[in-house]
Amino acid sequence: MKQWYELLFENYARKYDQECFVHGTAGECDFIEKEIAYDKSLKIIDIGCGTGRHSIELAKRGYHITGIDLSDAQLKRAKEKAAEQGVQIVFEKHDARDLPFKNEFDLAIMLCEGGFSLMETDEMNFEILKNATKALKNNGKLIFTTLNGLFPLYHSLEEFYADAGGNGNSTCRSNTFDLMTFRDHNTTIFEDDDGNKMELKSNERYYVPCEITWLLKTLGYRKIDIFGAKLGAYSRNDKLTTEDFEMLVVSQK
């Protein structure tokens, strides 16, 4: 049986590109470039690349990118967009829990919940971090965003999604945050690319900073920095707070 995140992305690529949360790509890539000192010789893997927005923007800036995703529809749209914009990117279908790469990349990015935190068990989420780490060379960097577990302790997720719902096509309702597992169980409501209204029972894992730090230390990262993730404006100056819905993690092997 397909999981909710597989069903969500079966026919939701063009509409995905219209969502409010995908409009910060250029600013997010500015941060990524700065983190790798604008070195265009580096190889980058975009895990959970979706419709390729970060991959395409970085390729346009001259970087070597491989984009991987589990969704055929998202990859098809990514390839179309890359062709339209005249950039060469390798897009491949892979499950982030089982990647074929070993010591190949200088940087791995995993942004806007590109797989990590969507899996149905903590073990599966950890497999994604393990596989991203395996794909990196020594001294490689992993930059990713994930849901900030401090946020739902201070805010109603249902109210947060209701406020954000007017800005896009998809929203989450009937949110129930489980304090024992730090999972938000909800009904995801969206319109697919054919205009069909869809509802899915989904759940996402929220993480607190010390958990992320421990998981990454377990995988051998020497340097781990965690910040608040501001849409389109990632910055090392943004200390993570309870007001941040997402956290931005920058780690180096």
Image (spheres, helix red, strand yellow):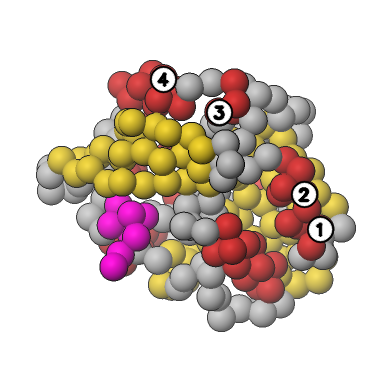
Q: Which mark is residue 217?
A: 1
The answer to whether the residue labelled 4 contacts the one labelled 1, judged by CB atoms less than 8 Å apart, is: no
Q: Is residue 20 left or right of residue 234?
A: left
Residue at 46% x, 70% y is 95
Q: Are marks 1 and 3 in contact (CB under 8 Å)?
A: no
Q: Residue at 79% x, 62% y: name it.
A: 218
Regarding residue 178, the answer to whether it shows in the image is yes
Tell me what residue is drawn at x 41 percent, y 72 percent. Answer: 93
Q: Reading the chain from its start, which is encountered first: label 4 or label 2? A: 4
Q: Give the distance between the C-alpha atoms of the residues marked 2 and 3, in whole angstroms.
A: 19 Å
On residue 152, the disc is 3
**Disc 2 marks which amino acid?**
Thr
N-terminal label among 2 and 3: 3
Q: CA distance from mark 4 to mark 1?
A: 35 Å
Q: Distance of mark 4 from mark 2, alpha carbons?
A: 29 Å
Which kind of residue does numbered mark 3 sit on? Pro
| Camera-nearest residue between 92 and 132 | 132
Front position among marks 2 and 3:
3
Q: Which mark is residue 213?
A: 2
Q: Secondary structure of the magenta portion, mostly?
A: helix
Residue 252 location in percent, x, y? 79, 57
Q: Is residue 6 magenta?
A: yes
Residue type indicated by callout 4: Glu
Disc on the earlier residue, 3 or 4? 3
For label 4, the crowd category at 10 Å Cα-Cα, with few meaning under 14, some 14 to 19 and many 20 or more, is few
Query: Which quarter of the picture shows residue 52?
Result: bottom left
